[in-house]
Amino acid sequence: MIKLTTYTGLLCSIFLLVGCDGFLGKKTNTDFIEVPTYSPREVAYVPVQPALIGFVSPVDIIAGFDELIYVVDDATEEIISLDESGKILARIKVQGVRAVAQNRRLDLLAIGSVDILKAGETLTFTCIYKIDMHGPGNNFGLQYAQVVDTIIHPFYFKSTYSSSDSKVQFNKIAVLEDNRFYVTRTGTDNNAQKFGGPDDAVLLFDADGTYLTPISVNTPSGLFRDYFKKPMGISSFVQPPQVSAGGPDHFVFTSIAENTSIKVQIIDFIETDFGANYEPRILVETDTTVADDNLTTPDRFAQPVSTLVTGDGSNYIFVVDKSKDSFYQFTVTGLEGVKPPTGAASTKYQLASFGGRGEGLSQFNSPSAVAYKNRIVWICDTGNGRILRFKLTTDFQ
């Protein structure tokens, strides 16, 4: 495996706006959030104002284990850190950056691109930058960021490259409890028998960035090396505020393949005395008296580009559909909606999904990512160049 180790030179520039004390920063006053006074539904996500502007093309967002929010703006090739109130703290340049994740060591894993000179020709490949944000002493923050490792496709599993390798893209990263991580990958060469497997894949790396394996999925029809079709979004079940708790190797992924009917699935990691397998979770609840819809309803989504499992015990799965300009909320059992509050007229799960194209505070234009912190949903409203925040009416005290 070939890795490039580079340092601050690859981070073109760092613009420090506000520092943060200690590894977890300063505690943010969230009294700015006001209880809304309107809602046509008994349960609904309502806007937390103001909308966060000043971005050009925000395409990814996460709530970090360090209690900060990180936004990727692919138009400016920046990672931007914010506190819980939405105040920008710092920003860095990263070539071709399109997605970001954070492990429990508080390193950022940023998907970007890198230029390599081969046989007199400059080629651009997708890559993962590992970014250390620890400064002198106990100082910590994006202002101290330096790239300490780079995983470049295809050199993490072979020493040569083909013409199709420059068309491969890493898409999203999901971190596991021990800092191993999954990566979704797409490309044009999807021969399941080729070395390294098809370009369309979910890959597993160890905590130090060493490539382990592409994920094969066991189904009643057999074991498939090419199970994943244009995988895009991915989320593990290990999320903030779980800074140390264990968790399974299960994951949720989204597909943007046009000919795939079920575009969001849960994949379970099953261990038995006879070995371990990845298997699709079968969600059997179809009773419309319980909930109106299900995560795996055929043709439920058009272009689901992002998904997130909440880590605070609420047990929600969020999905953002770029084509439908919509945000969807499900339970981990696949039911769409929220359990009704005590005393509600109906015991049926209440629909909380919303969206539609526009510039209103509950509308989107090509949304691309979702984050969740302290019961607030953060969504990249990419086409409108802003970050929108929402909170359930039942979550207001």
Image (spheres, rainbow, N blue to C red):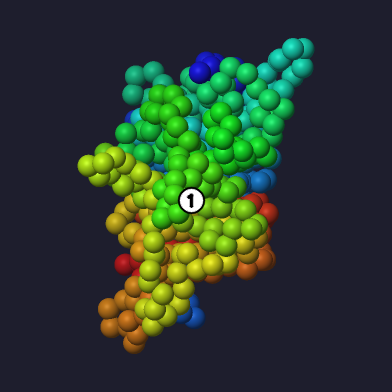
Check the image and name the residue furthest to the right: 120
Q: Name the secondary structure under disc 1.
A: strand
Going by the numbered disc 1, the residue's amino acid type is: Phe
Q: Can residue 65 be seen in this view?
A: yes
Q: Is residue 168 left or right of residue 175?
A: right
Can you give x and y, in whole percent of width and height, for residue 21 in the image?
A: 37, 31
Q: Mark 1 = which residue?
A: 253
Foreground residue among 276 and 75: 276
Can you give x and y, in whole percent of width and height, for residue 89 in the image?
A: 50, 37
Check the image and name the residue furthest to the front: 221
Foreground residue among 177 and 250: 250
Asked if residue 345 is positioned above or below residue 393 in the image, the reply reads below
Can you give x and y, in whole percent of width and height, for residue 382 in the image?
A: 64, 52
Can you give x and y, in whole percent of width and height, for residue 73 in the image?
A: 62, 41
Asked if residue 186 is positioned above or below residue 316 in the image, the reply reads above
Give residue 97's quadrant in the image: top right
Check the image and name the residue furthest to the top: 120
- The C terminus appears in which quarter of the rendering? bottom left
Q: Can residue 28 be seen in this view?
A: no
Asked if residue 190 is positioned above or below residue 221 in the image, the reply reads above
Foreground residue among 49 and 387: 387
The 10 Å Cα crowd at callout 1, few under 14, some 14 to 19, many 20 or more, is many
Foreground residue among 357 and 88: 357
Asked if residue 250 is positioned above or below residue 150 in the image, the reply reads below
The image shows a total of numbered marks equal to 1
Residue at point 58%, 17% (across, down): 159
Residue at point 44%, 24% (across, down): 210
